[in-house]
Image (cartoon, rainbow, N blue to C red):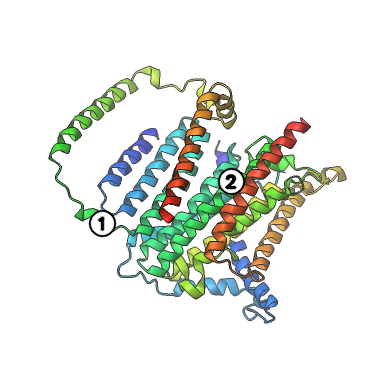
Amino acid sequence: MVLLFSSIAVGSAIMMITRRSPVISALYLIVNFFSVSAIYLMLRAEFIAIIQILVYAGAIMVLFLFVIMLLSLKDESKLVENLTYKKLGAIIIALLFLSTVGITTFFAFTDKFRTLSPLAEEMGTTEFIGKELYTTYSFPFELVTFILLAAIVGAIVLAQKKFE
Amino acid sequence: MWIELLITTVKIFIVVHVVLIGVAYTVYAERRVSAFIQNRYGPNRVGYEGLLQPFADVVKLAFKEDIVPENANKPVHRLAPMISIFVALTTMAVIPFGHTIELFGRVIPLQITDVNVGILYILALTSLGVYGITLSGWSSNSKYSLFGGIRSSAQMISYELSMGLSIIGVVLITGSLSLQDIVIHQYGWKWNIILQPLGFIIFLVASFAETNRAPFDIPEAEPELVGGYHTEYSSMKFALFFLAEYANMIIASAVITTLYLGGWQFPYLQEFGLPPLAVSLIQVATFGLKVAFLVFFFIWVRWSIPRFRYDQLMNLGWKVMLPLSILNIIVTAVIIKILK
């Protein structure tokens, strides 16, 4: 089952970056989010699985689609650039990526990664995540909220400047 | 193992069919109630007082020609109504329509599945409902459909936030995200509508917006948008959108009942000393009656209140509902802290 959903995830990711129409790309990204969420479910992380759908598929991608439709972007066929220098970088990144994939699949067949750790059973629940977030990790959590607040204020300032 | 699977399958079968027949008669009820409000008869020819009208409608829709626009994106055009109906029907899976029932010496919970993140599951699925509408608007390749789709996504994004935030009050009181726990917690007079009046009103208004019902039906405002997002749909694909819209209405009523109106709880029923089977049946009937009343309320509002303008809708969503729902969380949290 994990293999099925991870292959759907990889397949939809590839489809997403190769499609020409931005709306179709967005649709494949949503399929990708769903398969990742299914993998979370299999690892007994129900909270993260639902949040993945709620936040990414339900909110962020709706906004993306909204913006794409509002701007009514046409196919990207006209946007072909000269890619000589970028190709070199792409090859290096592809090699790095392939070696990461190789190492992970190699270690996946050892016993250490085959069994679910006993902590995983309780770690996926909402209560556990909430407790950890507000006790052990309260400082980083507050830091993130401040960064988000700053981003919101910044967005409002930029939007106001544009309309004045 | 196999018997559990069989029981679940039977439950799914019953729930889906009850919702679908409920949809048929909600449409009928809408036509009769609107006729009553506008002082005319409404459909009363097919069967006794028009009771067979829904079936006549289905037959008519099924025999119509299925027209797909020439320049439409055909796969997406076909996918959109499927998404709508899928989202509408799967939400029902976590809603408890009773506590437990004893049949053939076996205790069966009256809920398809009790997920421990029940509320989040409902929020996640309802937030996906917007895809059906947005994609149908985009794929039809027609400007009216596109406007309908864009309006609906803007509306859903604005109201989802206050909807989610108003639920937090209920979760704070119950201390659990499971819907069965929430209903059990509302025994006696302790319905959440009494403990959470502000949260109830916010959730109710947001539900109207999420189901695209009047006064929030600008995605399909006829005078300006022809038919809105489903302008270019015909035959059974149009019927699926219609079905999804009314199924969403029933499910929104079921969620409101579960969260705020005590779900299947009949106040102090346990103290009458009735046999367990009768208790279970009365509870299921109570749930059905509450849902039916809310569906009637949806219809009543639609034929009484005029439609909002687009900017009024956005102002209400972001400047009134959102601050109120945050206020509701703060007040609830402070009161719980004081009482403990």
Q: In which chain is the residue bearing label 2?
A: B
Residue B67's spot in the image, x, y percent?
37, 72
Alpha carbon separation for disc pair 1 and 2? 36 Å
Residue B69 seen from this side: yes
**Seen in the image, is B39 located left or right of residue A132?**
right
- Which type of secondary structure does the marked residue at label 2 adopt? helix
Q: Which mark is residue B164?
A: 2
Mark 1 is surrounded, within 10 Å at the Cα level, by few (under 14), some (14 to 19) or many (20 or more) other residues, namely: few
Residue B12's spot in the image, x, y percent?
57, 49
**Seen in the image, is A6 located left or right of residue A38?**
left
Residue B105 seen from this side: no
- Do the residues at discs 1 and 2 belong to one chain? no
Q: Which mark is residue A75?
A: 1
Q: Is residue B340 above or below residue B247?
A: above
Residue A27's spot in the image, x, y percent?
36, 50
Q: Which mark is residue A126?
A: none
**Seen in the image, is B230 located left or right of residue B183?**
left
| x 38%, y 18%: residue | A111
